[in-house]
């Protein structure tokens, strides 16, 4: 069994080790690539302050690139008895390079290592989430334009209320995603600050060049105060979780609408056949399972900030082992949300709408407000017009006029999709993903 980085002459029992390590080795595999990138930057910096010789640096970087290749090829594993990804990387370097491999931990703690790993990994995950949100936005806007002239009922209290359109319905979810992008942008900016060099939370007596590692890793800035850098553990995950939950909230509502509108009682939408499932005894069934699962998964994701709050709540400053448990709920959340986004993109691109909904007379009364407004526009006081139309409805005399002429901004006849796209494009360009991508490629000699 490999010894722990922290062990001296006392060895934990198997039961204690099992409890304290928990699922850390499993979830640390998520962070392996980020751990190597962070070690490459830290080691490069150590050479500039004289703690590693130039030839040692080159040997270390070469071996770390080999480890990185193994990680990307799926060959990397955390061996039995090795506590975490940091220990495994250092163990591999020591096996291959001898005592030189032991030098990479100078000026560093596993506390700032895991902080850095989480930030690098989360930064990359947020890039992928933003890309998928952008794709879904594009599909929603395309369908909004495609069906902009097709009317549908709008509802309040789940009662037929006023005329809406599929242009409005698809476009509403597109614009909702712009608010979600704002949350993601705030989360990304908080993630994009370098904690490396904070060590165990109180800095180091070595003259660490934190500006250098910030630049090498493509961070926007560093987390300056070393105590606050450690206080950011848990807070970072919680704030990012709020952003993920915002996207999940939009998806959950979209999924609910799609399930309801595709049922026979509504028949507004037809989902792709390959996104539905049948029944074991009812041959006619086409169940919207993909959107039902999306709704459930996204509702679960909306509980993620609360989970993280409960795990990290009431901790004083400094590091505590409680924070290890945040990985178990935080790391898997990204893939779950990305899966939901991919499914939503697939379905929205292929969904078809019923263009003859209003042929059904059950929707005639939703044009009552249009008639009230027509009378008021012709000079009748609004309250008198309202009363007249109400009495006509009760007497069975109401005849709907189904031609809609809304032109004000954001309405049926003026969706403002172009303006919403400008807003989204501006938000997307403010992320500056290219800085991080370029820095990581330079560090690994990919450019």
Image (cartoon, rainbow, N blue to C red):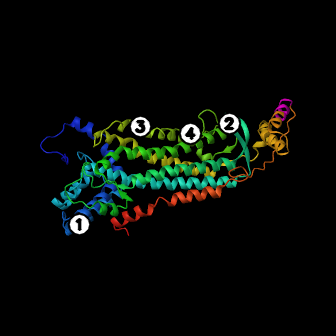
Mark 2 or 3 closer to N-term? 2
Q: Residue at x 66, y 55 (%)?
A: 416
Residue beneath disc 2? 156
Q: Residue at x 16, y 40 (%)?
A: 11
Residue beneath disc 4? 292
Q: Secondary structure at mark 4?
A: helix
Query: Is residue 433 one of those drawn in magenta?
Result: no
Q: CA distance from mark 1 to mark 4?
A: 55 Å
Mark 4 Cα shell of 10 Å, populated few (<14), some (14-19), many (≥20): some
* Prevailing SS of the magenta stretch: helix
Q: Residue at x 64, y 49 (%)?
A: 170
Q: Secondary structure at mark 3?
A: helix
Mark 3 Cα shell of 10 Å, populated few (<14), some (14-19), many (≥20): some
Residue beneath disc 1? 48
Mark 3 or 4 closer to N-term? 4
What are the residue bounds of the magenta stretch?
388-395
Left or right of 110, for residue 372: right
Q: CA distance from mark 2 to mark 4?
A: 23 Å
């Amino acid at each position: 069994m490999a010894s722990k980085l922290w062990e001296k002459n006392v060895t934990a029992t198997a039961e204690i080790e099992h409890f304290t390590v928990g699922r850390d080795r499993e979830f640390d595999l998520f962070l392996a690539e980020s751990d190597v990138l962070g070690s490459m930057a830290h080691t490069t910096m150590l050479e500039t302050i004289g703690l590693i010789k130039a030839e040692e640096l080159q040997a270390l970087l070469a071996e770390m690139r080999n480890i990185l290749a193994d990680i990307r090829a799926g060959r990397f594993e955390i061996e039995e008895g090795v506590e975490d990804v940091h220990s495994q990387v250092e163990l591999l370097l020591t096996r291959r390079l001898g005592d030189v491999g032991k030098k990479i931990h100078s000026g560093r703690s596993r506390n700032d290592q895991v902080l850095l790993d989480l930030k690098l990994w989360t930064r990359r995950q947020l890039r992928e989430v933003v890309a998928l949100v952008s794709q879904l936005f594009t599909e929603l806007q395309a369908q909004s334009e495609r069906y902009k002239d097709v009317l549908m009922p709008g509802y309040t209290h789940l009662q037929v209320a006023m005329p809406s359109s599929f242009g409005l319905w698809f476009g509403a979810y597109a614009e909702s995603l712009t608010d979600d992008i704002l949350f993601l942008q705030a989360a990304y900016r908080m993630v994009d600050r370098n904690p490396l060099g904070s060590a165990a939370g109180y800095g180091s007596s070595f003259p660490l060049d934190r500006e250098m590692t910030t630049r090498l890793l493509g961070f926007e800035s560093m987390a300056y105060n070393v105590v606050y850098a450690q206080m950011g553990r848990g807070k970072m995950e919680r704030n990012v979780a709020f952003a993920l939950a915002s996207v999940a909230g939009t998806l959950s509502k979209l999924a609910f609408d799609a399930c309801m509108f595709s049922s026979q009682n509504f028949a507004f939408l037809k989902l792709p056949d390959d996104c539905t499932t049948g029944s074991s005894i009812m041959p006619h069934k086409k169940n919207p399972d993909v959107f039902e699962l999306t709704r459930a998964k996204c509702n679960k994701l909306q509980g993620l900030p609360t989970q993280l709050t409960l795990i990290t709540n009431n901790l004083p400053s400094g590091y505590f082992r409680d924070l290890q448990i945040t990985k178990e709920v935080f790391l898997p959340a990204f893939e779950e949300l990305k899966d939901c986004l991919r499914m939503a993109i697939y379905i929205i691109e292929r969904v078809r709408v019923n263009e003859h909904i209003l042929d059904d007379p059950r929707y005639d009364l939703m044009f009552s407000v249009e008639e009230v407004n027509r009378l008021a526009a012709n000079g009748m006081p609004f309250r008198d017009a309202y009363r007249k139309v109400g009495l006509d409805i009760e007497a069975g005399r109401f005849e709907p006029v189904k031609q809609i002429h809304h032109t004000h901004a954001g309405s049926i006849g003026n969706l403002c999709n172009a303006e919403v796209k400008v807003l989204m494009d501006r938000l997307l360009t403010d992320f500056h993903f290219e800085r991080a991508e370029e820095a990581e490629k330079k560090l690994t000699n990919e450019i």
